[in-house]
Amino acid sequence: MPDHAEPTDQALPVASRRPVRAVLLDFHGTLAQVEKPRDWVLAAAATCGVRLDPVRATALADRLLTAGRAGGPLPARVPPHLAELWADRDLYAHAHRGAYTGLAATVDTGVDGLAEALYERLLLPEGWVLYPDTAPTLAALRAAGVRVAVVSNIGFDIRPFFAAWGIADLVDAFVLSYEVGRCKPDPAIFWRACGMLGVDPEETLMVGDSPADAGAVAAGCAALVLPAADPGRPNGLGSVLALTHGG
């Protein structure tokens, strides 16, 4: 989906708004990050019965990132036969799987079944790394009485991840693009999240890591865009607490 809003590292605006009663949180790049590329390739190859040399795994990971990895940079090129799936990847589960397995299949890895195994790794909590501030921030928001929804452009269900990580009870709602038929920055997905939480946009803060997340401003929400951070490194998520009435 195209990004129509410019990123910002400050909330827009907060001082003159009603107190924040709810926080909408992006998933990838905000709460969690995909595992390191070489680890991703090594783990997927192992499920195919192949133990890769780390040097070869690193080389394959570089090629697969260029082709396009879910949770990674945009592909250098989307082949024409995958264009329709790519356009719909965050709206339909089959399109998400088809787009990313198709992109991986454009790389000659020499490992039978690797494209599917790489995608299956994406569906496991072990394939992701929580940011250090995620659990503490969610717990603090819950303690402060702030409602929380995870709002994500994604083609599969991430609820099992939160259950596996022991933080499912800290999230009040999940608003996933493939389930609601809308993708960020479309204001409709933010309005849906506000409706599910029972709050007005004017008392809601959207927190993410991309211009698409800042699109919440068009829906009447405030927005905070965090800097990019590697897996396991702090990304500033804890700053959300200072912008809520409980901070």
Image (cartoon, rainbow, N blue to C red):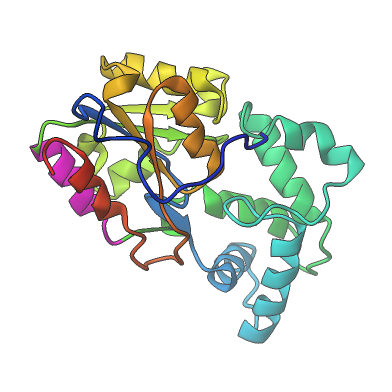
Question: Magenta part of the protein: which range?
Answer: 132-143
Q: Quadrant of residue 96?
A: top right
Whether residue 19 sits left or right of residue 208 in the image: it is left
Whether residue 181 sits left or right of residue 247 in the image: it is right
The residue under the point 44% across, 23% down is 190
Does 148 appear above or below 38? above
One can see residue 101 in this view: yes
Q: Quadrant of residue 220?
A: top left
The magenta stretch spans residue 139: yes
The magenta stretch spans residue 236: no
Whether residue 226 sits left or right of residue 46 in the image: it is left
Horizontal and vertical percent position of residue 169: 20, 35
Does 113 appear above or below 208? below
Using the image as rendered, state which of residue 189 and residue 19 is in the foreground: 19
Main secondary-structure element of the magenta-colored stretch? helix
Using the image as rendered, state which of residue 130 and residue 41 is in the foreground: 130
The residue under the point 84% across, 65% down is 108
